Image: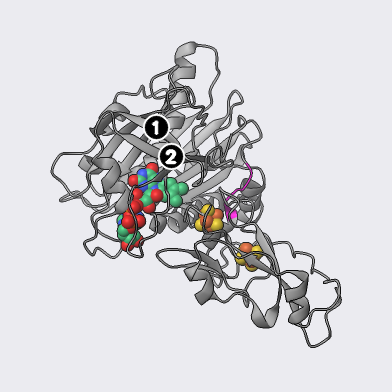
Amino acid sequence: MNAPAEIAVIKQHLIDPEICIRCNTCEVSCPVGAITHDSRNYVVDPDKCKQCMACVPPCPTGAIDNWRTMPKAIAHSLAAQFEWDELPPELSTDELAAAGVTADVEIAEPTPAVLPAAASGEEPFDSAAFNATLPPWSAAHAYTNLYGPKNPTTATVVGNVRVTQVGREYDTHHLMLDFGAMPYPVLEGQSIGILPPGVDDKGRPHHARQYSIASPRNGERPGYNNVSLTIKRVLEDHQGRPVRGVASNYLCDLKVGDKVQVIGPFGASFLMPNHPRSHIVMICTGTGSAPMRAMTEWRRRLRASGKFEAGKLMLFFGARTKEELPYFGPLMNLPKDFIDINFAYSRTADQPKRYVQDRIRERAADLAVLLKDPNSYFYVCGLKSMEEGVVLALHDVAQQAGLSWDKIGPALKAEGRLHLETY
Ligand SMILES: Cc1cc2nc3c(=O)[nH]c(=O)nc-3n(C[C@H](O)[C@H](O)[C@H](O)COP(=O)(O)OP(=O)(O)OC[C@H]3O[C@@H](n4cnc5c(N)ncnc54)[C@H](O)[C@@H]3O)c2cc1C
Ligand code: SF4
Ligand code: SF4
């Protein structure tokens, strides 16, 4: 269709609210801030979206990849998108004609996303710009979206134990789910979607929440069709105000034998390398330890088999105090020649505050060697607030070692060697 000169026609970019799991990945991927959200929906601003496609590959569900031919004057507004429970259909030819669009529409070619320049001192450092959307070249094949909100599967709780000290506000649980005869193949680094029962304050079913899988590919219990998750009970929001998180409290209170509605698996890039002598650097806080536990345990099982020549395994793990670290005890029992562990505590009495990025700077000499090595893979998971500081610390380590971040940063992204998952 050729629109009359006065009728501007766009291919409007929209997010499917029925599939979206509200993971925020698209919002951090968009270089122009076109994506926003409220407590219910993720939406795209038609006045800001440049159709660069940067948000499309990272979306774990494909909910982001929806486009509607629309006269710009009647494009779906943000206010309308926030109210949707499902996507509206394409306008029919008659509806388009009624809006003044009378012939074939020319759709503008998407413009490739542009990486922001590395930190120059003037531009703010954009850590998300270096987040790989491709997996490591040697990653195993990840199955994704086998189950969606319209066809969830059921898992049975086979274990629920606390992994932090009892009676404290940082209650964290290790939850084990069994899928019985239903296929649910996973890889370390993938996540699962949980559909909490009940409805939200508008009477609509709760949307799914995402949780990283904390067990290796062959099961929490090897050879069984089960996974484990690390769940922190949310009792205050990000501003510290009291709330009772819907899914985290539901999950932490589950009993053995309870049934859970599950979707997923999700994630096809935050995956571990499988080739011999590949190095893994894991940087996490809190429940960001879940995928690191999965990767570490898989490497531990490979080592026990005696059939895999592994590279280095380095862990940077941050928490306010050591009591808040999930899995602290088991971590301390791992052999030193298997994993190089660096803890950072920010609230230990009579000790200076230390964050993971401080530990990264202290280990600069070892990390610079790894940053240079194409067989090294870096994973960051945990609190959103740590992401920028961690990537900036890697940037500084590289620059101070005489390596150019302008080359290394984009290479880490392009080669699937830097993966960021923060929430
Ligand atoms: C890729 C991905 C992986 C994740 N993996 C894990 C995991 O392994 N373990 C885990 O416990 N969580 C994980 N999360 C977070 C999880 O999906 C939920 O967001 C979290 O459990 C809160 O859900 P809720 O239903 O309990 O809270 P909601 O009812 O959704 O939220 C209640 C209030 O708490 C705030 N809030 C939401 N999340 C948090 C939080 N984490 N801390 C503090 N306040 C919060 C909200 O802004 C809201 O104001 C992951 C998220 C993503 C995107
Ligand atoms: S599922 Fe896709 S569309 Fe929804 S918030 Fe995540 S990245 Fe965005
Ligand atoms: S297509 Fe590009 S501009 Fe549009 S929402 Fe996605 S990342 Fe942002």
Observer-nearest of 291 and 220: 220
Disc 2 secondary structure class: strand
x and y, in percent, of residue 45 in the image? 58, 73
Q: Residue furthest front?
A: 94
Q: Is residue 199 magenta?
A: no
Which is nearer the N-term, disc 2 or disc 1?
1
Q: What quarter of the picture does the C terminus occupy?
A: bottom left
Q: Are marks 2 and 1 in contact (CB under 8 Å)?
A: yes
From the viewer's side, name the closer residue of 180 and 303: 180
Q: Name the residue beneath numbered marker 1.
A: 155
Quarter of the rendering containing residue 98 = bottom right
Question: What residue is rendered at 53% in x and 67% in y?
Answer: 43
The amino acid beneath tag 2 is: Val
Question: Image point 51% across, 34% down: which residue?
Answer: 280
At x 30%, y 53%, the residue is: 246
**What's drawn in magenta, residue-wise?**
130-134
Residue 101 image point, x, y percent: 79, 79
Q: Is residue 388 left or right of residue 323?
A: right
- Res. 420 visible in picture: yes
Question: Element at badge 1?
Answer: strand
Name the residue that disc number 2 marks. 262
Along the viewing direction, whichever of 106 and 379 lies nearer the viewer: 106
